[in-house]
Amino acid sequence: MAEIVILGAGPTGISAAYHLEKKGFYDYKIFEKEPNIGGLCRSIRQDGFTFDFTGHLLHINDEYFRQFLQETINFEDFNNINRRSFVYSENTFTKYPYQINLHGLPTATIAQCLAGFIKRKKIRKKNKSFYDWVIENFGSGFAKYFFVPYQEKIFSYDIKKLSATWTGRFVPQTSLIEMINGALKDNETKIGYNSNFIYPKQGGINFWVNKIAEKIKNRVHTNFCVEKVDLVNKIVHFTNGEQENFKHLITTIPLDHLLNNLKEDSTTTLYRSANNLLCNSVINFNIGLKGNVSDKHWIYYPEKQYPFYRVGFWHNFSQLMAPEGHSSLYGEFSFLNKSNKYQNLILKKSLNHAYKLFEINTKDIVTQKVITIKHAYVIYNHWRDKHVPEILNILKTYNVNSIGRYGAWKYSSMQEAILDGKKVVDQIII
């Protein structure tokens, strides 16, 4: 028996292990269902190319996180990058974020966006939807041309049923002056949490997680998939026949999986909640090819004619992501409860659009890799906002802390994953 058991060796779980050891605490075990650590912060090597599980970038705006990185990595092993991201709409590239970079768009679009912003009104509702939030903060024009179509593509969910509680730092706020300046001329102002980021020079984003894991003395037990969690007797049962008793459980596995895997007599309230937790899935297609396909970091596609919501370019994060003289791109589209036939159809359409947009000759394609991410974006509907805090509090009464992006069922960054790991350790080890 370990006093503390950690489920999941993604950034949050690894952070929890690191901070336990930093406090001199080693009576813990950490288990990971995959053969390798990293969670979604993993990288695949194929035919000389490195592909991540979609775009993962390290943003730093917390002083402790900066200190943590100084303790665990060598900054010389990372590129410090200023964002080159764009929105493609109405056959025009505009810089991201859209709301301060209208220059180059049709006059009618600019006029509707600015007029909508000026005329926007306070919406007096107790539970505002994301749509309400957009109308109140940006107006009908920005809603029509960017926010509504883009967010419906990324979440695959009706944004009038999506709450606004997730927005926070993820949607940059601005002013009328900035909007007008960005409409009259090319705008050099960069706003938003991802305007600057760091990225490993080699190895993909998995390099970062591996560097943290190297600081941990206790080994990670891989290929341990959770089968059942007995909250009453405090036992985790794994599909390989092993089991582990615990005093405290730190779990970073998806909350719906945890609830579905609870021993039924543990608590009926929790067991029945799993089906109400909504999360979409993402198919991430990757292409490695000869020549240089783009000089951008990533591009957003709000318009419905394009199946994907974003395309990015690995070789512009690090030259070593592709062999010399080659480049690579990734694209993403989301879905919620769709058949394999539907997924394959949208994948085919996405690839064809990518080939056309970037003038890719199939003869230049060296390799392709398709990655399906079952848990991608948590759906912030009003059920989630009301019930998830209650679920997490009930789990805590059993000494179970469900944390991280999927453990706490939230939309968060890698920085927050590390901070979540530290916070839970500070609460358990006083």
Image (spheres, rainbow, N blue to C red):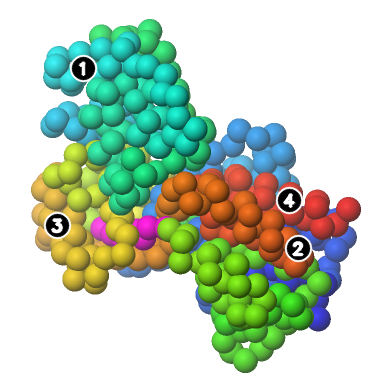
Helix, strand or loop status at disc 1 = helix
Q: Quadrant of the N terminus?
A: bottom right
Circle 3 Cα neighbour tier, 10 Å, few/some/many (<14 / 14–19 / ≥20)? some
Q: CA distance from mark 1 to mark 2?
A: 52 Å
Mark closer to the chain start, 3 or 1: 1
Q: Position of residue 334 (x, y in %)?
A: 31, 55
- Quarter of the image for residue 22 reads bottom right
Q: Work out whether 132 lies above or below 206.
A: above
| Res. 209 visible in picture | no
Mark closer to the chain start, 3 or 4: 3
Q: CA distance from mark 3 to mark 1?
A: 31 Å
- Residue 397, numbered circle: 2
Left/right of residue 339 with respect to residue 223 in the rendered view: left
Helix, strand or loop status at disc 4 = helix
Q: Work out whether 290 lies above or below 262.
A: above
Write the residue at 41% across / 30% down: 133
Helix, strand or loop status at disc 3 = helix
Residue position for label 4: 422
